[in-house]
């Protein structure tokens, strides 16, 4: 049996934090605000995977009011999601995702992101697609106020 899930996340850009997207530290003057490392891409992917398995969302699994997850590395949380999926009898088929950011440019980081995500889930890098786009200066991402990400995934019964 195959199941499809979709995920979305957004975080505000702020001073004094590193910018982590797809498990990769990106050279930029601002980072994303959040309880964990605020990795919008990995958060969207986790929500897509959990949604496909009807297991809720990352807020249910890793609550933002639990200090255990304060500053958490989202790649480590993604590994946990992968373990949960296996416990429920699912494997990851593929992931397709998009980062929406006016700046910084993501092109030079995408293969590293794909590799980190694939390794965390124990899947081949060819099964992970990461794309990036701008919103041509429109909306909160276009005004460089925040970064968003969308993800869709396919999971299958083991």
Image (spheres, helix red, strand yellow):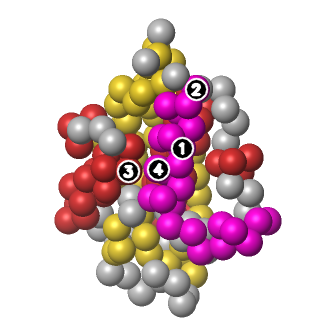
The local secondary structure at tag 4 comes to helix
Looking at the rendered structure, the secondary structure element under dot 2 is loop
**Distance in Å between CA atoms under marks 2 and 1:** 11 Å
- For the residue carrying disc 3, how many other residues have a C-alpha within 10 Å: few (<14), some (14-19), or many (20+)? many
Residue 22 can be seen in this image: yes
The Cα–Cα distance between marks 4 and 1, rounded to whole angstroms, is 5 Å
Under circle 1, the secondary element is: helix
Residue 149, image x, y percentages: 48, 51
Of tags 3 and 2, which is closer to the observer? Answer: 2
Task: Please state the extent of the stretch shown in magenta in the rendering.
Answer: 65-88
Say if 59 sits above or below 68 in the image: above
Camera-side residue of 129 and 138: 129
Give the farthest residue toward the bottom: 16
C-alpha distance separating marks 3 and 4: 5 Å
- Residue 129 drawn in magenta: no
Contact, CB < 8 Å: mark 2 with mark 1?
Answer: no
State the residue at coordinates (36%, 26%).
93
Residue topped by disc 2: 88
Residues marked 4 and 1 touching at CB (< 8 Å): yes
Position of residue 46 measured from the top left corner of the image (x, y, whole percent): 53, 45
Disc 3 or 2, which lies upstream in sequence? 2
Q: Which residue is mark 4?
A: 79
Q: How far apart are labels 3 and 2 at the CA level?
A: 18 Å
Q: Secondary structure at mark 3?
A: helix
């Amino acid at each position: 049996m195959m199941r499809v899930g979709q995920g979305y996340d957004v975080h505000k850009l702020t001073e004094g934090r590193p910018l982590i997207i797809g498990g990769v530290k990106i050279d930029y003057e601002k980072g994303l605000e959040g309880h964990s490392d605020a990795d919008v891409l990995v958060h969207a992917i986790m929500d897509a995977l959990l949604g496909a398995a009807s297991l809720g969302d990352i807020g249910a699994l890793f609550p933002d009011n639990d200090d255990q997850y304060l500053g958490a590395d989202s790649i480590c949380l993604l590994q946990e999601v992968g373990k949960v999926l296996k416990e429920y009898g699912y494997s990851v088929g593929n992931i397709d995702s998009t980062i929406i950011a006016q700046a910084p440019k993501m092109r030079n980081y995408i293969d590293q992101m794909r590799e980190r995500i694939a390794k965390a889930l124990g899947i081949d890098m060819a099964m992970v697609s990461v794309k990036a786009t701008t919103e041509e200066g429109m909306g909160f991402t276009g005004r460089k106020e925040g970064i968003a990400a969308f993800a869709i995934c396919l999971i299958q019964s083991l």
